[in-house]
Image: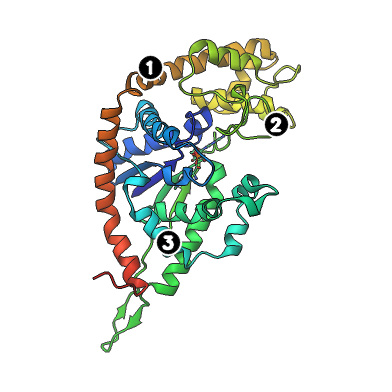
Amino acid sequence: MRVVSGIQPTGNLHLGNYLGAIRNWVRMQDELVTTGGECLFFLADLHAISQPHVPAELAANTREMAAALVACGIDPAKSILFNQAQVPAHAELQWLLNGTARMGWLNRMTQWKDKAGKNREGQSVALFTYPVLQAADVLLYQATHVPVGEDQKQHLELARDIAQAFNSAFGTKGFTDSQGHEVPGRDIFTQPDPIIPPEAARIMSLRDGSAKMSKSDPSEMSRINLADDADTIMQKVRKAKTDPEPLPSEMAGLEGRTEAANLVGIYAAMAGMKPDAVLAQFAGQGFGAFKPALGELLVEQLAPIAARFNALRHDGEALDAILAQGSARARHLAAPTLAAAYAALGLVRG
Ligand code: TYM
């Protein structure tokens, strides 16, 4: 088993990232230590340049995000933690895959459509080919499992399509030898499976139940950052948009109440309960009672993460050492697949 996933080092790590992806990274890391296999987690700094950015901020955010991941439980002794920019094979493989990916496939990506909006002509080429780099990120390591939130599912499907198209065009074909033995063909890439947590696949904004919680939302009140202090968390939950109705006893009763359903979902994910069990506990009560309970649960669970993050975030030397060591291991693991892809395409490297 080879687990690979990444996060863009733009802004703070928020509750959507944590419940949708990072918590699963930590679980898978801890499982693989006993069952065997490898985990690679990276900061997608190459992806971050697909939109306007401030170079000094990107460098600082890359270190901060590394600190946040360690604070959440990613252990550099168990997982390979690195940033793309230190592993040139990501950019190289992206170029090789650009020959296989099709404009039509990329044009269908909803994230491209959302981010480009009406101004496609004004976007960077990198924003358009972003999913090809994402495919390279996972195919480079023969990833078998990719833990992500729901919003990355389409990008993962594209990675599978690219792998399949490349394998069938450039992999070696199976044949029957002169003695009648079947000689199997050889694929260059493994097709990765997305791992999406059913209970927290899509955490929504605290201000708008139809928009996902996101780093790019201009309102700080829309998201809970893992480094928020207790007062800030309580205030954000208190001000979260809801409705005046009391909570029903089952999830079916929350249909059409997207903000309410989101808060119940967050409670359930944080408490490790089913949403129906949360409702069984709070049925008939209003948000005046539910919100303080949710706020306290969040504060209790996030406080140790925030404390570890604050202790680490300014230790640039330690963070650089973690990333340098992880990158060296990643470069080593990437080399055979990159070489196989060059060779399969007929590219002579000496
Ligand atoms: P990014 O940086 O936007 O998000 C990192 C992870 O957090 C998940 N996530 C959410 N999950 C549930 N609810 C939300 N509101 C929410 N917001 C974010 C994302 O699904 C993701 O798993 N393109 C990727 C980074 C990337 C990557 C990769 C991921 C680059 N290469 C290869 C996997 C494999 C991104 O921008 O994620």
Tell me the quarter of the picture where residue 318 sits.
top left
Indicate the position of residue 208 as horizontal and vertical percent values.
68, 29
Near-viewer residue (202 or 206): 206
Residue 109 lies left or right of residue 168; in this view the side is right
Q: Say few, some or many: other residues with alpha carbon within 10 Å of mark 1 (under 14 / 14 to 19 / 20 or more).
A: some
**Tag 2: amino acid:** Ala
**Mark 3 vs mark 2: in front:** 3
Quarter in which the C terminus is drawn: bottom left
Q: Nearer the viewer, residue 69 or 191?
A: 69
Q: For mark 1, what is the residue? A: 307
Residue at the image point whose x is 42% and y is 69% from the top: 167
Q: Which residue does the numbered mark 2 point to in the structure image?
A: 252
In this figure, which residue is indicated by the disc labeled 3?
95
Q: What percent of the width, then of the height, locates residue 70? A: 34, 29
- Would you say residue 76 is visible in this rendering? no
Q: Type of residue at label 3?
A: Trp
Residue at left offset 59%, top offset 22%: 278
